[in-house]
């Protein structure tokens, strides 16, 4: 069996020993740091199993795979894989769920606190020597507020959304949730009410036909002018141009983003205009990637391959309906 990692660099160099340990027993393991669009059909031609994170696999390149039996998504979201094509051609597809819950929730809350507490500005004041020169024992501008008593709106209440909800509640926030199927144990509201009501909004949905553009220009306009918006889902869930303009025009209190419609963040992207704005926090799609989370991801992929070999259907997404939030 030949297992090919198409973009191993997205998992981190520190995972290479773990990849060898976890997958070497299956057969030949090929680790490519990255695979360009033009290279995919050549690289996958003689592979039995593909492990992929960001590379797009669809009818345009999968037809070149003569021996392909299984695609393992090294993530929860799988919008980079044409699952319908795989169903039609007998290619099994697995993803990994729940591995990054704590990591993403941790970074979500860290981003919120960074913006609400104005941490970069206070740190800079000390680091550049202004605090030492001031002769004053403390500094209280820019003004920051306690989040206890605030309303934290969560879009998408899967594993990550629920974990963020628990942390927010523990910090004294009222938590409201927008999800497809209302739950009795959560305060569920429609998306427009959430946008109008929340002081903090964090998004944790997969990218589907339903969620693409969910946070539209109109809904961004509904948000409170001092609200903090956090996107830890997928870039295309929100209107990136409208978010940029809201920050530029002072119609949004803060913006934290870890995901982008095109990654890495391209030159000319609207966000480039506000990268150094004091009310923004941009990170390079790393919220999922605590060491422990990446190791859990690889361990689950290994189990998925073993499950497939043994004729079981663990984490098989090609056997399920289209993903919804």
Image (cartoon, helix red, strand yellow):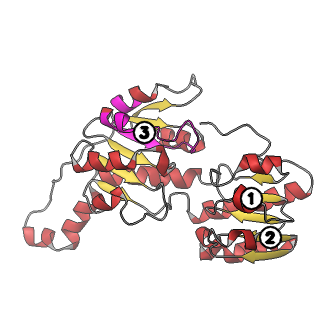
Give how far apart the Cα atoms at labels 2 and 3 are: 40 Å
Give the numbered dot on residue 45. Answer: 2
Q: Position of residue 112 (x, y in %)?
A: 37, 49
Between 10 and 144, the one nearer to me in the picture: 10
Q: Relative to residue 8, is residue 185 depicted above or below? A: above
N-terminal of the pair, mark 1 or mark 2, is 2
Name the residue that disc number 3 marks: 215
Which element is circle 1 on? strand
Relative placement, left or right, of 199 versus 311 is: left
Q: Position of residue 25 (x, y in %)?
A: 86, 72
Residue at x 48%, y 48% (from the top left corner) = 236
Segment tinted magenta in the rendering: 194-221
Q: In the rendered image, which quarter is residue 53 located in?
A: bottom right
Name the residue that disc number 1 marks: 72
Q: Nearer the viewer, mark 2 or mark 3?
A: 2
Give the numbered dot on residue 134. Answer: none
């Amino acid at each position: 069996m030949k297992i090919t990692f198409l973009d191993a660099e997205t998992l981190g160099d520190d995972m290479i020993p773990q990849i060898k340990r976890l997958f070497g027993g299956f057969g030949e393991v090929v680790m490519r740091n990255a695979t360009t669009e033009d290279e995919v059909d050549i690289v996958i031609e003689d592979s039995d199993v593909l492990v992929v994170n960001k590379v797009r696999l669809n009818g345009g390149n999968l037809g070149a795979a003569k021996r392909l039996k299984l695609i393992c998504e090294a993530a929860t979201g799988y919008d980079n894989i044409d699952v319908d094509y795989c169903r039609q051609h007998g290619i099994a597809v697995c993803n990994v769920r729940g591995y990054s819950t704590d990591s993403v929730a941790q970074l979500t809350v860290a981003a919120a606190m960074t913006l609400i507490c104005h941490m970069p500005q206070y740190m800079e004041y000390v680091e550049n020597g202004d605090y030492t020169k001031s002769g004053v024992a403390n500094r209280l501008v820019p003004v920051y507020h306690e989040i206890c008593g605030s309303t934290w709106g969560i879009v998408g209440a899967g594993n990550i959304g629920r974990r963020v909800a628990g942390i927010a509640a523990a910090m004294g926030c009222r938590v409201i949730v927008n999800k497809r199927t209302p739950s009795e144990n959560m305060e569920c509201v429609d998306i427009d009410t959430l946008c109008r009501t929340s002081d903090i909004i964090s998004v944790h949905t997969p990218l589907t036909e339903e969620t693409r553009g969910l946070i539209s220009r109109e809904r961004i306009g509904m948000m409170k002018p001092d609200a903090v918006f956090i996107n830890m889902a997928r870039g295309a869930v929100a209107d990136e141009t409208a978010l940029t303009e809201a920050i530029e025009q002072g119609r949004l209190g803060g913006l934290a983003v870890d995901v982008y419609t095109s990654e890495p963040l391209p030159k000319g992207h609207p966000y480039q205009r506000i990268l150094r704005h004091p009310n923004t926090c941009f990170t390079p799609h790393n919220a999922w990637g605590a060491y422990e989370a990446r190791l859990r991801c690889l361990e689950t992929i290994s189990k998925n391959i073993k499950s497939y070999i043994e004729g079981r259907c663990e984490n098989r997404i090609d056997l399920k309906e289209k993903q919804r939030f």
